[in-house]
Amino acid sequence: MEAEGVTLEVEEADFEGGTTSVEAAVASGVDAAAELAIRAEDSTITPTDSVVRHPADQEVCPGAEVDLEAAIALISREKAQVVMMIENLNGPGTSLQIDDRGILSFLPVTSLLQGARTGVFKRFSPFPMAPISPPEYQLYRTSSSPDTQLEKSPISPSAPEAPPKRKRGRLTKEQLAQLERLFAADCSPTVARRREISAQVGCPERQIQVWYQNSANSPSIFACSRRAKAKNTGEKCKTRPRVPSPVKEPPELCQAIQTDLAMLIQEDDSSVFTIPCTTLTIGGWNRVNFEDENDLLAWICEKKRCFTWFVRSDDYSFKMQVALDSLKELAFKNAEPGKAFLTLEISSPPSFFLRRNLKREFGVPPPCWRRCEDWTENKVASRNLRHVLGGPALPLANVVTYIKSLMEDAKPVSLHSVDYPAPTDTQISSHQSSTSISTTPTYPSPFIDDNFYLPPQESRSWDSLPCSNSRTPMYDTKSPPQSYDHHGLNHSRTHALPYGNRQYGDIHAGHDEMRLLGTDVGPVSAQPERLSPLLQAPQPRQFYPETAEVDTVAHFQPANYYQPYPPTGHQQQPHSSSHPLPHFSELFSPVRDSF
Amino acid sequence: MEAEGVTLEVEEADFEGGTTSVEAAVASGVDAAAELAIRAEDSTITPTDSVVRHPADQEVCPGAEVDLEAAIALISREKAQVVMMIENLNGPGTSLQIDDRGILSFLPVTSLLQGARTGVFKRFSPFPMAPISPPEYQLYRTSSSPDTQLEKSPISPSAPEAPPKRKRGRLTKEQLAQLERLFAADCSPTVARRREISAQVGCPERQIQVWYQNSANSPSIFACSRRAKAKNTGEKCKTRPRVPSPVKEPPELCQAIQTDLAMLIQEDDSSVFTIPCTTLTIGGWNRVNFEDENDLLAWICEKKRCFTWFVRSDDYSFKMQVALDSLKELAFKNAEPGKAFLTLEISSPPSFFLRRNLKREFGVPPPCWRRCEDWTENKVASRNLRHVLGGPALPLANVVTYIKSLMEDAKPVSLHSVDYPAPTDTQISSHQSSTSISTTPTYPSPFIDDNFYLPPQESRSWDSLPCSNSRTPMYDTKSPPQSYDHHGLNHSRTHALPYGNRQYGDIHAGHDEMRLLGTDVGPVSAQPERLSPLLQAPQPRQFYPETAEVDTVAHFQPANYYQPYPPTGHQQQPHSSSHPLPHFSELFSPVRDSF
DNA sequence: TTATAATTTAATAGT
DNA sequence: ACTATTAAATTATT
């Protein structure tokens, strides 16, 4: 194959320390395999040394993959005259490519040459691929002396033992954050659990395993035995999520409440399922979180039968509670891998709370949640009843499962994280490209003054409100603006969502969307016999709706002060809400029967 | 335990970059556990940072094990005033020891102090154990100000978030040189080996590890994958020394010839073992090398059956060859850690060579070795037949092993690097304090003129001399001044030298000396049947002794032009030497049998 | 800025 | 699954 080639001469490259003549030669041959050799022809360098080598220490030989970047780096440091040869190309300008690991096997010659021409030469992979037609370059044959000629190792024992190239993938920040969270919840997950995590996080199971391993053992100062740490600080390294919930929840859903998280959410139900979310969109209002902090959370409180969206800014934390039973429609949509959106159509606006962010100190009662006015921008949340929550796919999917299980004894719905849904999806795009992105509640928080912080009063505490000793629901039953039923549940639109993402499971493109409740709202003719055990096993619980006056103080005791049923017999009459309330109990709650 | 202690003040330590006051304090207490804290009291260092940490990043606390070496290294890099405190000793001077992992838990205080006193401080483990009685030191209580006082961490959560300040120590030229060499020999040493290296080079194991790592992987040009380079240029990265010698050599001995080194020594035997030495003493003549260059080397050429001492000065390189078989006695003696002396008693003077130092250019034949007159001062080497070579302990010890293996099928002798033999040793002191230290051959190099550089003539080349196709030895057999045999081998004086140094093995103090050959020279009644395989496996090779005229040109072809046996039939009669020659062949070479 | 020391983190191997 | 180690990538320091 003393084939012709293509050449380009670069007079001056910007290699530091001296002007260096760079010469790039591309020769096309017959072989399909490409050979790349870069050679520094400096007299101070011995011929053998000057052959550029693969970073993985393999000699460059036909068919070999070459990390051009490393090679270039080498050359630039060599300050040597350089000859690059690409031989046995299928055809100039077309056949080389850089794979996703930045490794070159078949590099677009043009980019190579262009790189050389511009003298950039430092990084290679993302070179402009501008198709420069081969004619632009001269056919060329390296004019080096025979002995300096690269003896094209006859392909033969080219790296007889191809050292199983260690491809080092790096976890993204998000993935790491997720893993950290999950680790905190359970530092030694089972195989099955790992598989779930793998799906959720979006990387191979093996990688998850390795991560947990390394996290547990690494002598790193940070990790400093994440697991060991957990073992010491926390209890005995929660090998299982420790929530003794009677429900057989899907994994991530029943994530344990970390201590700090518990402090954060200050929910008195130890079985709340917190979901760290990335976006919350209500109409034009949009709150994003970059997952480095627990700044945007969602959880479901079974006891109170509500969703909560939690938002934290510098000085204050905010939350809004959406009654489970005000849910008209619930739609799940996959987004990028591991991510999804959950769209909720509710029939009544949420209730709003805020709480001062204070470091807890001994002797000082921690700030507690206070009811407040809608803190979203322009109080949009009071008008727009469509919430779009973006976050980790699996937990969000599990929310669907969970909600579904509240209505019917359905089999758990599995999640399918499809290939990136083209961003053409209206839901997503409308969501993503939505108006302003406010990283904090934009509405001036109402009622924030020092008087606002009343000492927690048992009598006013939500927790101490009677719950189930009276089966009378505590909600305001008047003025349901709409009625609905769940016959409207559009099963034809409720696709099974394959579990996992495309890396580890079957891919059923197109099944990335699911809706739980029909769009239409029918009359309340519930089918109590189809209620899930979830609702029957624990004593019927009640949702405390928007009954309190706007400035009512809600106090939740810490989780570990949880007061089981039956609570105090003392009960408080709900106030009337300024918002219309749905007759959600007529729909789902077996409580109805006991009325 | 505000116990009394023992103190020693060292006014000036030789930490590079500045004079540093070093203070060592030893306090004895009641606890059996020892606490060691080393603290740099530099205002530029925060208190927490200045607490020396275990290499594994653990804070030093009572009972903790501390890698003193690392600590010392750290301190020396800090260039800070240093307070060492050893508290809760069982008793001063007795209770600390370094375990086999080089970790200190109970260090012999005396050595610590002595080290401090002498300011050596670089290496710790093998410090002289000379029992210095505690009274020699004053009772002492650190007089530092309260706040700088080491708050003996109430074990508590001392630095909750001590930013693990990264202290960047830099390797000295010498260390780097050593490492480079060692790397060339073995680019991925085992842990044990690394520990040795660490000891030898004099910096913490961790640093060694890091260096190797960076050398192997870094895209640096020097490193530029030093390991990669090694892998490619050499065979497949000698994870083991690559010499296919039948002997099971200990590492450092079978160091590969680096390219430049090969050029330097211009030996045609690819299996020579070069040993970078620090001193060569022959009588009153003394040549030292500071190890930053390959200016003083020793090697053994199995093929020629000779030792060679190589000395390089600015314009010329010199060497002398000592016939292996003229060896009367060989003594090994440990010196400072990692260093040793080898004393050779030979029965006949070496032969001398010189070569001009020229950069090689293409087309120009490289300068070659030329026989010449004794170039030592006053030609002392021709009269004094006792050579003392100082250098790295292990290789030198291995020389002994090697030589031993030439004479008997003995198990390899391992080396013991004892605690510093007290510098009272006559051999060392006489050597170290010997007359003039000349950094270059002081004798005016003879025959240096332009005529001296004859073009290499095949017929005159030493390499092309017939070797084995005629089994007739080429040496001058006349006038052996002495006869000898190796029955004289004094086994009672041949101690087994434990391999490794005291850090990693049993310590048998006192076994730091060994002699191989008896001091007496007996008649030549060789026992050919006891010859080692080394001498039998490769075709019998011959030593080219001092046969040529003094101005004979010896030309060694480059290694890669190596001409295997049988060489050209053309043979050249040796000239008669001006020196008496031993009948070495009668002793060892099986060639004798074929006479 | 470069060179190189040191750390962090992913991955492998041995057990 | 745990341990130790390697290797890649990154950070930091001079």
Image (cartoon, coloured by chain):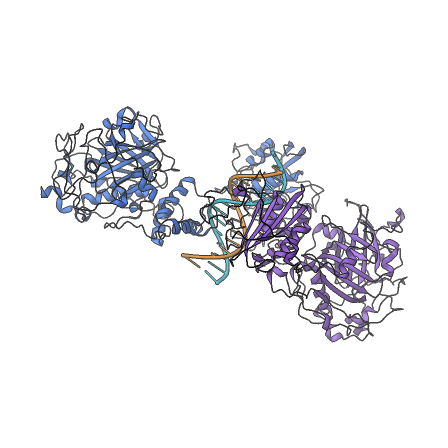
Chain colours: A blue, B purple, C cyan, D orange
Determine the residue positioned at 89% across, 51% down.
B447
Task: Give how far across and how far down residue B43 sits, in percent.
Answer: 58, 38
| Residue B329, percent from left and from top | 78, 67
**Residue closest to the eye, B304 or B364:** B304
Asked if residue B441 shows in the view, the reply is: yes
Asked whether, in this view, residue B271 is left or right of residue A431, the answer is right
**Above-or-below relation of B522 to A487:** below
Where on the picture, by quarter, is residue A367? top left
Q: Nearer the viewer, residue B318 or A139?
A: B318
Query: Horizontal placement of A392 versus A221: left or right?
Result: left
Q: Quadrant of the C terminus of chain B?
A: bottom right
Q: How many marks?
A: 0
> Which residue is more in the foreground, B345 or B43?
B43
Quarter of image, res B413: bottom right
Can you give x and y, in whole percent of width and height, for residue B574 in the image? 87, 63
- Where does residue B154 sit, x and y in percent of width and height? 46, 48
Looking at the image, residue A281 lies above or below residue B319: above
Q: Is residue B218 left or right of residue B294?
A: left
Q: Is residue B304 visible?
A: no
- Residue B53, compared with residue A583, is above or below; it is below
Please identify the residue farthest to the top as the structure is shown.
A378
Along the viewing direction, whichever of A425 and B475 lies nearer the viewer: B475
Q: Is residue B78 left or right of residue A581?
A: right
